Image: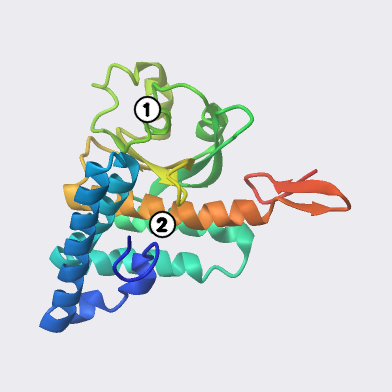
Amino acid sequence: MDALGGDPQWSETFPWLARTSQSWKLRRLLEEAEAVHRRSADRLRALGQEDLAQRADKFAAWIRFDLDEPLAARRLYTATRDLREVSRPGSLFGTALDGALSLAGADRGNIQLLDPATGSLRIAAQRGFGAEFLDYFAAVDDDRSACGRAAKERAQTVIVDVNRDESFAPHRDIAAASGFRAVQSTPLVDRAGHLVGVVSTHYPRPYSPSELDLQLLRRYGELAGRAMSKHLSATRHHRDGKPLTRAVDGSPVL
């Protein structure tokens, strides 16, 4: 289905795109790949394979994004390159959060992982928050917050002003105490599209990220989610005949 062979890893396949976007040969190659994915989507949809058709559409859309927004694509590749270069597995979540903050132009945020046993979100990394915020959002299992909505709906959620968002009303006091008025939350998903967690960025004043920044964060949610999923899978191995997993802070849980 992939014109370039297999499931494309854009951050690895096209790291040179932003530097050579004026090369007509390279552009033609990518445009041809985009067209192949579009045709594949049409054929799959005609065969009733809607899930695969949507996947092909997504690949085509990201090729088009690389072609139309080479400078933004460079920002994305820089952030995902940092994920690949993490030497200590325990620092992956913090590195992933730093990449999201950079793409979103924010200085505060957090990454929450989905707890498969309870279905709740638990904080794995954070920047800029105190103990009160961390205690309050230690485990999120409702859909009133931005992160809870993003997890439930498997879709990016933006609250431009928490004081005007009716659903967010139960959490306004902690937002005021923590000094944020706007928040966006993006799902982190694995290769199969399953939810791994949510990355959220917070802003001190009412704010709506640009559509370009939101696009970047959606794609980043896919790439970071894959990296995190691999890490989490790797830590679930057997030691002395018992499964070993790790808590969100990296400590082993037997």
Disc 2 on helix, strand or loop?
helix
Q: Secondary structure at mark 1?
A: helix
Whole-number angstrom distance, CA of label 1 to CA of label 2: 32 Å
Q: Position of residue 101 (x, y in %)?
A: 37, 53
Residue at the image point whose x is 47% and y is 41% from the top:
194
Question: Which label sits in the foreground, 1 or 2?
Answer: 2
Q: Quadrant of residue 80?
A: bottom left
Q: Depth check: give the residue in front, 147 or 64.
A: 64
Q: Position of residue 110 (x, y in %)?
A: 46, 44
Taking 232 as reference, is 6 left or right?
left
Q: Which amino acid is tagged 1?
A: Ala
Between 108 and 144, the one nearer to me in the picture: 144
Q: What kind of residue is marked 2?
A: Leu
Alpha-carbon neighbours of circle 2 within 10 Å: few (<14), some, or many (≥20)? many
- The quarter of the image holding the N terminus is bottom left
Does residue 189 show up? yes
Which numbered disc, 1 or 2, marks the residue that appears first in the sequence? 1
- Tell me residue 235's x, y (percent): 68, 54
Relative placement, left or right, of 19 versus 184 is: left
Using the rendered view, name the quadrant where residue 72 is placed. bottom left
Marking on residue 223:
2
The residue under the point 27% across, 22% down is 163
Which quadrant is the C terminus positioned in? top right
Res. 138 mark:
none
Mark 1 lies on residue: 176
63 displayed left or right of 244: left
Query: Measured from the top left, where is residue 41 in percent x and y?
Result: 23, 51
**Disc count in the image?**
2
How packed is label 1: few (under 14 Cα within 10 Å), some, or many (20 or more)?
few
